[in-house]
Image (cartoon, helix red, strand yellow):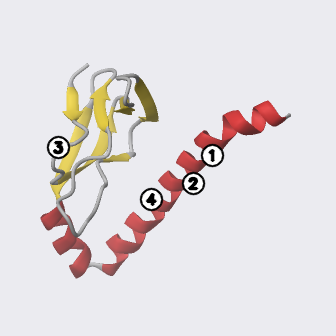
């Protein structure tokens, strides 16, 4: 139940889950929790913007014992600027995360259409 980061707080770190399960969620205007994703080992958390220090768009809470690796956006930008291979690998991982998110959003609608 430990909070990793909160919606609306300025983001300065990006996290990689090494172990455990993390729930990401937003609160609607009625105070209802809307789960946006369940994340496991090898998933990234906390991406908002590389260039700007904008607030997190969701909150993240540990659902079980979790081990995380965190890196500041500034350090990550420096590493990516120096190593194209790491940049490409990160883009691939992020693409997979986006595809997984889109699939999880569309799945309930596709089932209801069947």
Disc 2: which residue? 99
Q: Are marks 2 and 4 in contact (CB under 8 Å)?
A: no
SS under mark 2: helix
Query: Which residue, given by chain and number where applicable, does mark 1 sit on?
Result: 103
Q: Of residues 63 and 66, which is closer to you in this image? A: 63
**Discs 3/2, front:** 3
Q: Which residue lies furthest to the front in this view?
A: 29
Point out which mark residue 93 bears: 4
Mark 4 or mark 1: whose residue is earlier in sequence: 4
Distance, label 3 to label 2, CA atoms, is: 26 Å
Q: Distance between the residues labelled 3 and 1?
A: 28 Å
Q: Vertically, is 83 above or below 3?
A: below
Query: At numbered mark 1, what does the secondary structure look like: helix, strand or loop?
Result: helix
Q: Under tag 3, what secondary structure?
A: loop
- The structure residue drawn at horizontal position 86% and vertical position 34%, both measured from the top left corner, is 114
In the picture, measured across the screen, residue 79 lies left or right of residue 101, that is left
Residue 96 percent location from the top left of the image: 52, 56
Q: What residue do we see at 21% from left, 34% from top?
A: 4
Left or right: residue 73 compared with residue 92: left
Verify CB contact (< 8 Å) between mark 3 and mark 4: no
Q: Residue 102 in the image: x percent, y percent?
A: 58, 49
Question: Nearer the N terminus, badge 2 or badge 4?
Answer: 4
């Amino acid at each position: 139940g430990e909070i990793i980061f909160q919606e609306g707080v300025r983001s300065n770190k990006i996290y990689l889950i090494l172990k455990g399960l993390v729930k990401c969620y937003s609160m609607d205007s009625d105070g209802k929790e809307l789960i946006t994703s369940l994340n496991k080992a090898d998933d990234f958390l906390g991406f908002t913007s590389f260039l700007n220090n904008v607030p997190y768009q969701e909150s993240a809470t540990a659902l079980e014992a979790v081990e995380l690796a965190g890196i500041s956006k500034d350090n990550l930008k420096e590493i990516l600027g120096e190593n194209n291979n790491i940049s490409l690998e990160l883009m691939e991982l992020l693409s997979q995360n986006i595809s997984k998110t889109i699939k999880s959003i569309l799945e309930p609608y596709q089932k209801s259409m069947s």
